[in-house]
Amino acid sequence: MNQGKVHVTETILRDGHQSLLATRMRTEDMIPVADKLNRVGYWSLEMWGGATFDSCLRYLKECPWERLRTLRKAMPNARFQMLLRGQNLVGYHNYPDDIVERFIDRAAAGGIDVFRIFDAMNDPRNMKAAIEAARKVGKTVEGAICYTISPVHSLEYFVRLAERLADMGVNVICLKDMGGLLAPYAAYALVRALKSRVALPLHLHSHCTAGLAPMSYMMAIEAGVDILDTALSPLSQGTSQPTTESIVAALKGTPRDTGLDLGLLGEIAQHFYAVRRKYAEFDSPVNNQVKTDILISQVPGGMLSNLVAQLRQQKAEDKLEAVMAEMPEVRKDLGYPPLVTPTSQICGSQAALNVMTGKRYSVVALETRNYVMGLYGEPPGPISDEIKKKVLGKKEPITCRPADLLKPGLEMARKEIGSVARSEEDVLSYALFPEIAREFFNWRARQGVPSRDATAA
Ligand code: CO
Protein backbone atom coordinates (compact mmCIF):
# COMPACT_ATOMS: atom_id res chain seq x y z
CA MET A 1 0.00 0.00 0.00
CA ASN A 2 1.21 3.51 -0.80
CA GLN A 3 2.64 5.15 2.33
CA GLY A 4 4.53 7.95 0.60
CA LYS A 5 3.49 11.54 0.29
CA VAL A 6 0.02 12.51 -0.90
CA HIS A 7 0.16 14.56 -4.09
CA VAL A 8 -2.20 17.45 -4.66
CA THR A 9 -4.00 18.76 -7.74
CA GLU A 10 -5.19 22.34 -7.30
CA THR A 11 -8.59 23.00 -8.90
CA ILE A 12 -9.16 26.68 -8.14
CA LEU A 13 -8.58 27.75 -11.75
CA ARG A 14 -11.16 25.26 -13.11
CA ASP A 15 -13.55 23.26 -10.93
CA GLY A 16 -13.36 25.70 -7.98
CA HIS A 17 -14.94 28.57 -9.88
CA GLN A 18 -16.98 26.26 -12.15
CA SER A 19 -18.66 24.89 -9.01
CA LEU A 20 -19.05 28.13 -7.05
CA LEU A 21 -18.94 31.07 -9.49
CA ALA A 22 -20.65 29.70 -12.61
CA THR A 23 -17.24 29.34 -14.36
CA ARG A 24 -16.83 33.11 -14.62
CA MET A 25 -13.24 33.67 -13.43
CA ARG A 26 -11.23 35.65 -15.97
CA THR A 27 -7.60 35.12 -16.95
CA GLU A 28 -6.74 38.58 -15.56
CA ASP A 29 -7.71 37.29 -12.09
CA MET A 30 -5.35 34.33 -12.38
CA ILE A 31 -2.25 36.16 -13.54
CA PRO A 32 -1.45 38.13 -10.34
CA VAL A 33 -0.73 34.88 -8.43
CA ALA A 34 0.64 32.88 -11.36
CA ASP A 35 4.21 33.14 -10.13
CA LYS A 36 3.20 31.85 -6.69
CA LEU A 37 1.04 29.02 -8.08
CA ASN A 38 3.99 28.11 -10.27
CA ARG A 39 6.17 27.67 -7.17
CA VAL A 40 3.82 25.66 -4.90
CA GLY A 41 4.88 22.23 -6.12
CA TYR A 42 1.42 20.82 -6.83
CA TRP A 43 1.27 17.52 -8.65
CA SER A 44 -0.82 19.43 -11.20
CA LEU A 45 -2.88 22.56 -11.64
CA GLU A 46 -6.29 22.02 -13.21
CA MET A 47 -6.85 25.15 -15.25
CA TRP A 48 -8.59 24.37 -18.54
CA GLY A 49 -11.40 22.30 -20.04
CA GLY A 50 -14.72 21.31 -18.51
CA ALA A 51 -17.04 24.30 -18.84
CA THR A 52 -14.25 26.91 -19.01
CA PHE A 53 -13.86 26.70 -22.79
CA ASP A 54 -17.55 27.35 -23.43
CA SER A 55 -17.69 30.04 -20.74
CA CYS A 56 -14.68 31.91 -22.19
CA LEU A 57 -16.30 32.20 -25.61
CA ARG A 58 -19.91 32.61 -24.48
CA TYR A 59 -19.73 34.90 -21.44
CA LEU A 60 -16.24 36.26 -20.98
CA LYS A 61 -15.40 37.10 -24.60
CA GLU A 62 -11.98 35.57 -24.06
CA CYS A 63 -10.26 33.22 -26.46
CA PRO A 64 -9.79 29.98 -24.47
CA TRP A 65 -6.63 29.18 -26.45
CA GLU A 66 -5.22 32.57 -25.59
CA ARG A 67 -5.89 31.82 -21.91
CA LEU A 68 -3.95 28.59 -22.23
CA ARG A 69 -0.97 30.32 -23.87
CA THR A 70 -1.00 33.20 -21.39
CA LEU A 71 -1.09 30.91 -18.35
CA ARG A 72 1.60 28.66 -19.83
CA LYS A 73 3.88 31.63 -20.23
CA ALA A 74 3.18 32.83 -16.69
CA MET A 75 3.67 29.39 -15.11
CA PRO A 76 6.46 27.63 -16.96
CA ASN A 77 7.01 24.95 -14.29
CA ALA A 78 3.49 23.99 -13.26
CA ARG A 79 2.01 20.78 -14.64
CA PHE A 80 -1.16 21.85 -16.44
CA GLN A 81 -4.21 19.62 -16.36
CA MET A 82 -7.47 19.79 -18.28
CA LEU A 83 -10.82 18.01 -18.03
CA LEU A 84 -12.00 16.41 -21.27
CA ARG A 85 -15.42 14.81 -21.76
CA GLY A 86 -14.19 11.99 -24.01
CA GLN A 87 -15.73 12.18 -27.47
CA ASN A 88 -17.62 15.32 -26.34
CA LEU A 89 -14.30 17.14 -25.75
CA VAL A 90 -15.38 20.36 -23.98
CA GLY A 91 -18.84 20.37 -25.57
CA TYR A 92 -22.11 18.54 -25.10
CA HIS A 93 -22.31 16.01 -27.93
CA ASN A 94 -20.03 13.62 -29.80
CA TYR A 95 -17.56 15.12 -32.26
CA PRO A 96 -15.95 13.15 -35.09
CA ASP A 97 -12.53 11.60 -34.48
CA ASP A 98 -10.61 14.06 -36.67
CA ILE A 99 -11.81 16.95 -34.49
CA VAL A 100 -11.01 15.03 -31.30
CA GLU A 101 -7.49 14.32 -32.50
CA ARG A 102 -6.77 17.85 -33.70
CA PHE A 103 -8.21 19.43 -30.54
CA ILE A 104 -5.97 17.35 -28.30
CA ASP A 105 -2.96 17.99 -30.51
CA ARG A 106 -3.47 21.78 -30.23
CA ALA A 107 -4.23 21.64 -26.50
CA ALA A 108 -0.98 19.74 -25.96
CA ALA A 109 0.93 22.23 -28.11
CA GLY A 110 -0.61 25.07 -26.09
CA GLY A 111 0.68 23.62 -22.84
CA ILE A 112 -1.62 20.91 -21.43
CA ASP A 113 0.44 18.19 -19.72
CA VAL A 114 -2.30 16.00 -18.22
CA PHE A 115 -5.53 15.05 -19.97
CA ARG A 116 -8.23 13.78 -17.63
CA ILE A 117 -10.63 11.95 -19.89
CA PHE A 118 -14.07 10.68 -18.85
CA ASP A 119 -17.40 9.63 -20.28
CA ALA A 120 -20.72 10.25 -18.52
CA MET A 121 -21.80 6.67 -19.29
CA ASN A 122 -18.42 5.14 -18.39
CA ASP A 123 -18.32 3.67 -21.90
CA PRO A 124 -14.60 3.24 -22.76
CA ARG A 125 -15.44 3.36 -26.48
CA ASN A 126 -16.40 7.04 -26.00
CA MET A 127 -12.95 7.66 -24.48
CA LYS A 128 -10.90 5.68 -26.98
CA ALA A 129 -10.16 8.34 -29.62
CA ALA A 130 -9.26 10.92 -26.96
CA ILE A 131 -6.98 8.53 -25.06
CA GLU A 132 -5.19 7.54 -28.28
CA ALA A 133 -4.77 11.16 -29.35
CA ALA A 134 -3.32 12.20 -25.98
CA ARG A 135 -0.97 9.22 -26.00
CA LYS A 136 0.15 10.11 -29.51
CA VAL A 137 1.32 13.56 -28.40
CA GLY A 138 3.15 11.96 -25.47
CA LYS A 139 1.14 13.55 -22.66
CA THR A 140 -0.03 12.06 -19.35
CA VAL A 141 -3.44 10.45 -19.72
CA GLU A 142 -5.83 10.03 -16.81
CA GLY A 143 -8.65 7.60 -17.44
CA ALA A 144 -11.51 8.76 -15.23
CA ILE A 145 -14.30 6.62 -13.84
CA CYS A 146 -17.56 8.36 -12.95
CA TYR A 147 -18.66 7.22 -9.52
CA THR A 148 -22.30 6.53 -8.85
CA ILE A 149 -24.42 4.25 -6.70
CA SER A 150 -26.70 1.58 -8.18
CA PRO A 151 -27.18 -2.19 -8.11
CA VAL A 152 -24.86 -2.57 -11.13
CA HIS A 153 -22.12 -0.26 -9.83
CA SER A 154 -20.36 -2.80 -7.64
CA LEU A 155 -16.74 -2.75 -6.52
CA GLU A 156 -16.08 -5.33 -9.21
CA TYR A 157 -17.66 -3.10 -11.88
CA PHE A 158 -15.32 -0.20 -11.04
CA VAL A 159 -12.24 -2.41 -10.84
CA ARG A 160 -13.00 -3.99 -14.20
CA LEU A 161 -13.51 -0.58 -15.77
CA ALA A 162 -10.16 0.59 -14.37
CA GLU A 163 -8.48 -2.55 -15.74
CA ARG A 164 -9.97 -1.84 -19.14
CA LEU A 165 -8.69 1.75 -19.07
CA ALA A 166 -5.26 0.48 -18.02
CA ASP A 167 -5.31 -1.85 -21.03
CA MET A 168 -6.08 1.18 -23.22
CA GLY A 169 -2.81 2.73 -22.08
CA VAL A 170 -3.82 5.41 -19.56
CA ASN A 171 -1.10 6.48 -17.10
CA VAL A 172 -3.29 7.31 -14.11
CA ILE A 173 -6.73 6.15 -12.94
CA CYS A 174 -9.04 8.85 -11.64
CA LEU A 175 -12.08 8.16 -9.51
CA LYS A 176 -14.40 11.04 -10.33
CA ASP A 177 -17.19 11.60 -7.82
CA MET A 178 -18.95 14.54 -9.45
CA GLY A 179 -22.02 14.23 -7.25
CA GLY A 180 -20.18 14.00 -3.93
CA LEU A 181 -21.87 10.65 -3.24
CA LEU A 182 -18.77 8.70 -2.26
CA ALA A 183 -19.00 7.80 1.43
CA PRO A 184 -15.88 7.28 3.60
CA TYR A 185 -15.97 3.51 3.98
CA ALA A 186 -16.97 3.01 0.36
CA ALA A 187 -13.98 5.20 -0.55
CA TYR A 188 -11.71 3.03 1.58
CA ALA A 189 -12.91 -0.20 -0.01
CA LEU A 190 -12.78 1.18 -3.53
CA VAL A 191 -9.30 2.69 -3.18
CA ARG A 192 -7.98 -0.54 -1.65
CA ALA A 193 -9.48 -2.61 -4.46
CA LEU A 194 -8.25 -0.32 -7.23
CA LYS A 195 -4.76 0.01 -5.74
CA SER A 196 -4.36 -3.72 -5.26
CA ARG A 197 -5.60 -4.74 -8.69
CA VAL A 198 -4.51 -1.95 -11.03
CA ALA A 199 -0.83 -1.02 -10.99
CA LEU A 200 -1.31 2.68 -11.73
CA PRO A 201 -1.38 5.84 -9.61
CA LEU A 202 -4.88 6.59 -8.31
CA HIS A 203 -6.32 10.11 -8.30
CA LEU A 204 -9.49 11.01 -6.39
CA HIS A 205 -11.86 13.83 -7.33
CA SER A 206 -14.90 14.64 -5.21
CA HIS A 207 -17.24 17.46 -4.22
CA CYS A 208 -18.29 18.55 -0.72
CA THR A 209 -21.94 18.97 -1.79
CA ALA A 210 -23.30 16.40 0.66
CA GLY A 211 -20.64 16.95 3.31
CA LEU A 212 -18.90 13.62 2.75
CA ALA A 213 -15.80 14.49 0.72
CA PRO A 214 -13.35 15.53 3.49
CA MET A 215 -14.11 12.31 5.40
CA SER A 216 -13.84 10.25 2.23
CA TYR A 217 -10.51 11.88 1.36
CA MET A 218 -9.15 10.91 4.78
CA MET A 219 -10.22 7.30 4.31
CA ALA A 220 -8.83 7.29 0.76
CA ILE A 221 -5.50 8.52 2.17
CA GLU A 222 -5.55 5.68 4.71
CA ALA A 223 -6.27 3.24 1.88
CA GLY A 224 -3.30 4.47 -0.16
CA VAL A 225 -4.65 6.97 -2.69
CA ASP A 226 -1.84 8.75 -4.54
CA ILE A 227 -3.28 12.12 -5.64
CA LEU A 228 -6.18 14.25 -4.36
CA ASP A 229 -8.06 17.13 -5.98
CA THR A 230 -8.46 20.12 -3.66
CA ALA A 231 -9.29 23.81 -4.00
CA LEU A 232 -7.76 26.69 -2.06
CA SER A 233 -10.04 27.90 0.76
CA PRO A 234 -11.68 30.88 -1.03
CA LEU A 235 -13.26 28.54 -3.58
CA SER A 236 -13.53 25.25 -1.71
CA GLN A 237 -16.23 23.32 0.14
CA GLY A 238 -19.92 23.44 -0.73
CA THR A 239 -20.37 22.28 -4.31
CA SER A 240 -16.58 22.53 -4.79
CA GLN A 241 -13.65 20.36 -3.59
CA PRO A 242 -12.26 19.93 -0.05
CA THR A 243 -9.84 22.68 1.03
CA THR A 244 -6.20 22.52 -0.04
CA GLU A 245 -4.84 24.15 3.12
CA SER A 246 -6.87 21.83 5.42
CA ILE A 247 -5.62 18.69 3.69
CA VAL A 248 -2.04 19.98 3.78
CA ALA A 249 -2.41 20.77 7.51
CA ALA A 250 -4.07 17.43 8.26
CA LEU A 251 -1.11 15.50 6.88
CA LYS A 252 1.68 17.72 8.20
CA GLY A 253 4.40 15.74 9.98
CA THR A 254 2.94 12.38 8.98
CA PRO A 255 4.43 9.90 6.51
CA ARG A 256 1.90 11.14 4.00
CA ASP A 257 2.84 14.85 4.37
CA THR A 258 2.14 16.70 1.10
CA GLY A 259 5.24 18.84 1.54
CA LEU A 260 3.36 21.97 0.45
CA ASP A 261 4.03 25.31 2.16
CA LEU A 262 1.00 26.58 4.10
CA GLY A 263 2.47 30.10 4.19
CA LEU A 264 2.68 30.31 0.41
CA LEU A 265 -0.80 28.79 0.03
CA GLY A 266 -2.12 31.42 2.44
CA GLU A 267 -0.68 34.23 0.32
CA ILE A 268 -2.35 32.85 -2.79
CA ALA A 269 -5.64 32.40 -0.90
CA GLN A 270 -5.65 36.09 0.07
CA HIS A 271 -5.78 37.00 -3.60
CA PHE A 272 -8.67 34.65 -4.36
CA TYR A 273 -10.78 35.94 -1.46
CA ALA A 274 -10.82 39.26 -3.29
CA VAL A 275 -11.56 37.49 -6.57
CA ARG A 276 -14.57 35.75 -5.05
CA ARG A 277 -15.97 39.11 -3.92
CA LYS A 278 -15.48 40.48 -7.43
CA TYR A 279 -17.80 37.78 -8.81
CA ALA A 280 -20.39 38.09 -6.04
CA GLU A 281 -23.24 38.30 -8.58
CA PHE A 282 -22.55 34.68 -9.60
CA ASP A 283 -22.13 33.50 -6.04
CA SER A 284 -25.04 31.85 -4.27
CA PRO A 285 -25.04 31.12 -0.52
CA VAL A 286 -26.84 27.86 -1.34
CA ASN A 287 -23.65 26.64 -3.06
CA ASN A 288 -21.88 26.65 0.28
CA GLN A 289 -24.58 24.89 2.27
CA VAL A 290 -24.37 21.17 2.84
CA LYS A 291 -27.17 19.52 0.86
CA THR A 292 -28.03 16.03 1.94
CA ASP A 293 -31.13 15.49 -0.24
CA ILE A 294 -28.95 13.87 -2.86
CA LEU A 295 -28.00 11.12 -0.41
CA ILE A 296 -31.63 10.01 -0.36
CA SER A 297 -32.95 10.88 -3.81
CA GLN A 298 -29.65 10.69 -5.74
CA VAL A 299 -31.06 13.59 -7.75
CA PRO A 300 -28.35 16.23 -8.31
CA GLY A 301 -29.28 19.79 -7.35
CA GLY A 302 -29.07 21.21 -10.88
CA MET A 303 -31.38 18.53 -12.14
CA LEU A 304 -33.98 19.25 -9.50
CA SER A 305 -34.19 22.94 -10.41
CA ASN A 306 -34.54 21.96 -14.11
CA LEU A 307 -37.40 19.67 -13.22
CA VAL A 308 -39.23 22.24 -11.14
CA ALA A 309 -38.91 24.76 -14.00
CA GLN A 310 -40.19 22.20 -16.50
CA LEU A 311 -43.21 21.33 -14.36
CA ARG A 312 -43.98 24.98 -13.63
CA GLN A 313 -44.06 25.68 -17.37
CA GLN A 314 -46.78 23.06 -17.70
CA LYS A 315 -48.55 24.28 -14.57
CA ALA A 316 -47.98 20.91 -12.95
CA GLU A 317 -45.85 21.73 -9.94
CA ASP A 318 -48.13 19.55 -7.82
CA LYS A 319 -46.75 16.54 -9.75
CA LEU A 320 -43.21 17.06 -8.44
CA GLU A 321 -43.43 14.37 -5.82
CA ALA A 322 -44.79 11.83 -8.31
CA VAL A 323 -42.05 12.71 -10.80
CA MET A 324 -39.39 12.36 -8.11
CA ALA A 325 -40.73 8.89 -7.31
CA GLU A 326 -40.78 7.96 -11.01
CA MET A 327 -37.21 9.06 -11.61
CA PRO A 328 -35.44 6.08 -9.99
CA GLU A 329 -37.81 3.80 -11.94
CA VAL A 330 -36.77 5.43 -15.23
CA ARG A 331 -33.12 5.23 -14.24
CA LYS A 332 -33.57 1.52 -13.58
CA ASP A 333 -35.35 1.06 -16.94
CA LEU A 334 -32.41 2.77 -18.67
CA GLY A 335 -29.75 0.55 -17.08
CA TYR A 336 -28.72 2.84 -14.19
CA PRO A 337 -26.72 5.57 -15.94
CA PRO A 338 -24.68 7.84 -13.62
CA LEU A 339 -26.88 10.93 -13.13
CA VAL A 340 -24.81 13.65 -14.78
CA THR A 341 -25.33 15.78 -17.88
CA PRO A 342 -26.84 14.59 -20.19
CA THR A 343 -28.27 11.44 -18.60
CA SER A 344 -29.75 13.34 -15.64
CA GLN A 345 -31.87 15.44 -18.03
CA ILE A 346 -32.92 12.38 -20.01
CA CYS A 347 -34.14 10.56 -16.89
CA GLY A 348 -35.83 13.69 -15.52
CA SER A 349 -37.69 14.58 -18.71
CA GLN A 350 -38.87 11.03 -19.33
CA ALA A 351 -40.02 10.68 -15.71
CA ALA A 352 -42.05 13.89 -16.14
CA LEU A 353 -43.60 12.57 -19.37
CA ASN A 354 -44.44 9.24 -17.73
CA VAL A 355 -46.26 11.02 -14.90
CA MET A 356 -47.98 13.70 -17.01
CA THR A 357 -49.39 11.28 -19.57
CA GLY A 358 -50.44 8.81 -16.90
CA LYS A 359 -49.15 5.97 -19.11
CA ARG A 360 -45.45 5.14 -18.90
CA TYR A 361 -43.57 5.55 -22.22
CA SER A 362 -46.77 6.33 -24.16
CA VAL A 363 -44.83 9.47 -25.11
CA VAL A 364 -41.08 9.06 -25.54
CA ALA A 365 -38.71 12.04 -25.66
CA LEU A 366 -36.28 12.12 -28.60
CA GLU A 367 -33.35 12.01 -26.17
CA THR A 368 -34.75 8.90 -24.47
CA ARG A 369 -35.09 7.23 -27.88
CA ASN A 370 -31.50 8.17 -28.81
CA TYR A 371 -30.31 6.87 -25.46
CA VAL A 372 -32.02 3.51 -25.88
CA MET A 373 -30.71 3.41 -29.50
CA GLY A 374 -27.23 3.44 -27.95
CA LEU A 375 -26.22 6.83 -29.35
CA TYR A 376 -24.87 7.98 -25.98
CA GLY A 377 -22.94 4.76 -25.46
CA GLU A 378 -23.58 1.47 -23.77
CA PRO A 379 -25.69 1.72 -20.59
CA PRO A 380 -24.02 0.34 -17.44
CA GLY A 381 -26.80 -2.19 -16.91
CA PRO A 382 -29.14 -3.97 -19.34
CA ILE A 383 -32.31 -2.42 -20.73
CA SER A 384 -35.18 -4.91 -20.76
CA ASP A 385 -36.72 -6.05 -24.07
CA GLU A 386 -40.02 -4.63 -22.89
CA ILE A 387 -38.60 -1.11 -22.51
CA LYS A 388 -36.66 -1.41 -25.78
CA LYS A 389 -39.87 -2.33 -27.60
CA LYS A 390 -41.85 0.49 -25.96
CA VAL A 391 -39.22 3.07 -26.84
CA LEU A 392 -37.87 1.89 -30.20
CA GLY A 393 -40.78 -0.11 -31.64
CA LYS A 394 -39.28 -2.44 -34.24
CA LYS A 395 -35.91 -0.67 -34.43
CA GLU A 396 -32.78 -2.25 -32.96
CA PRO A 397 -30.12 -0.39 -30.96
CA ILE A 398 -26.75 0.21 -32.61
CA THR A 399 -23.90 -2.03 -31.53
CA CYS A 400 -20.99 0.07 -32.84
CA ARG A 401 -19.15 2.94 -31.14
CA PRO A 402 -21.48 5.97 -31.46
CA ALA A 403 -18.77 8.15 -33.05
CA ASP A 404 -18.35 5.55 -35.83
CA LEU A 405 -21.55 7.00 -37.28
CA LEU A 406 -20.01 10.48 -37.68
CA LYS A 407 -18.27 11.76 -40.82
CA PRO A 408 -15.02 13.73 -40.46
CA GLY A 409 -15.81 17.37 -39.67
CA LEU A 410 -12.65 19.45 -39.53
CA GLU A 411 -12.36 20.38 -43.23
CA MET A 412 -16.04 21.24 -43.37
CA ALA A 413 -15.62 23.56 -40.34
CA ARG A 414 -12.53 25.14 -41.93
CA LYS A 415 -14.41 25.85 -45.15
CA GLU A 416 -17.47 27.23 -43.33
CA ILE A 417 -15.64 29.69 -41.12
CA GLY A 418 -13.16 30.70 -43.84
CA SER A 419 -10.98 33.75 -43.28
CA VAL A 420 -12.87 34.77 -40.13
CA ALA A 421 -10.66 32.18 -38.39
CA ARG A 422 -7.17 33.48 -37.68
CA SER A 423 -5.64 30.20 -36.60
CA GLU A 424 -6.13 26.46 -36.45
CA GLU A 425 -7.32 26.98 -32.86
CA ASP A 426 -10.06 29.31 -34.12
CA VAL A 427 -11.19 26.61 -36.56
CA LEU A 428 -11.46 24.20 -33.60
CA SER A 429 -13.42 26.70 -31.49
CA TYR A 430 -15.79 27.01 -34.44
CA ALA A 431 -16.02 23.23 -34.96
CA LEU A 432 -17.02 22.82 -31.31
CA PHE A 433 -19.35 25.79 -30.82
CA PRO A 434 -20.26 27.15 -34.28
CA GLU A 435 -22.65 29.96 -33.35
CA ILE A 436 -20.94 31.11 -30.17
CA ALA A 437 -17.48 31.03 -31.76
CA ARG A 438 -18.62 33.04 -34.78
CA GLU A 439 -20.21 35.60 -32.49
CA PHE A 440 -16.96 35.79 -30.52
CA PHE A 441 -14.86 36.21 -33.69
CA ASN A 442 -17.11 39.04 -34.86
CA TRP A 443 -16.91 40.72 -31.46
CA ARG A 444 -13.13 40.35 -31.50
CA ALA A 445 -12.91 41.93 -34.96
CA ARG A 446 -15.04 44.87 -33.80
CA GLN A 447 -12.72 45.39 -30.82
CA GLY A 448 -9.75 45.49 -33.15
CA VAL A 449 -7.99 42.82 -31.10
CA PRO A 450 -4.74 42.14 -32.94
CA SER A 451 -4.20 38.67 -34.36
CA ARG A 452 -2.02 36.22 -32.49
CA ASP A 453 0.92 36.77 -34.85
CA ALA A 454 0.81 40.50 -34.26
CA THR A 455 0.83 40.05 -30.47
CA ALA A 456 3.64 37.51 -30.64
CA ALA A 457 5.86 39.93 -32.54
CO1 CO B 1 -15.82 18.12 -10.41
Image: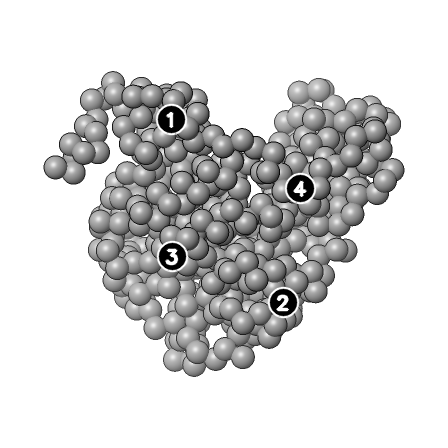
Judge the density around disc 2: few (<14), some (14-19), many (≥20) Cα neighbours within 10 Å: many
Q: Which residue is mark 2?
A: 190
Contact, mark 4 vs mark 1 (Cβ under 8 Å) = no
x%, y% of residue 288?
Answer: 50, 48
Judge the density around disc 4: few (<14), some (14-19), many (≥20) Cα neighbours within 10 Å: few
User: Of helix, strand and loop, which one carries label 1?
Assistant: helix
* Label 3 to label 4: alpha-carbon separation: 28 Å
Amino acid tagged 1: Arg
Would residue 65 appear left or right of 403 to someone viewing this image? left
**Residue 112 vertical position relative to residue 224 in the rendered view, above or below:** above
Residue 144 visible at all: yes
x%, y% of residue 80?
Answer: 35, 54
Residue 296 visible at all: no
Amino acid tagged 4: Cys
**Residue 49 vertical position relative to residue 181 in the rendered view, above or below:** above
Counting residues from the start of the chain, the first of labels 2 and 4 encountered is: 2
Q: Residue at 46% across / 41% down in the picture?
A: 100
* Label 2 to label 3: alpha-carbon separation: 29 Å
Q: Quadrant of residue 435?
A: top left
Q: Which residue is mark 1?
A: 414
Compare residues 288 and 208 and report the one nearer the observer.
208
Q: Which residue is mark 4?
A: 400
Q: Which residue is mark 3?
A: 138
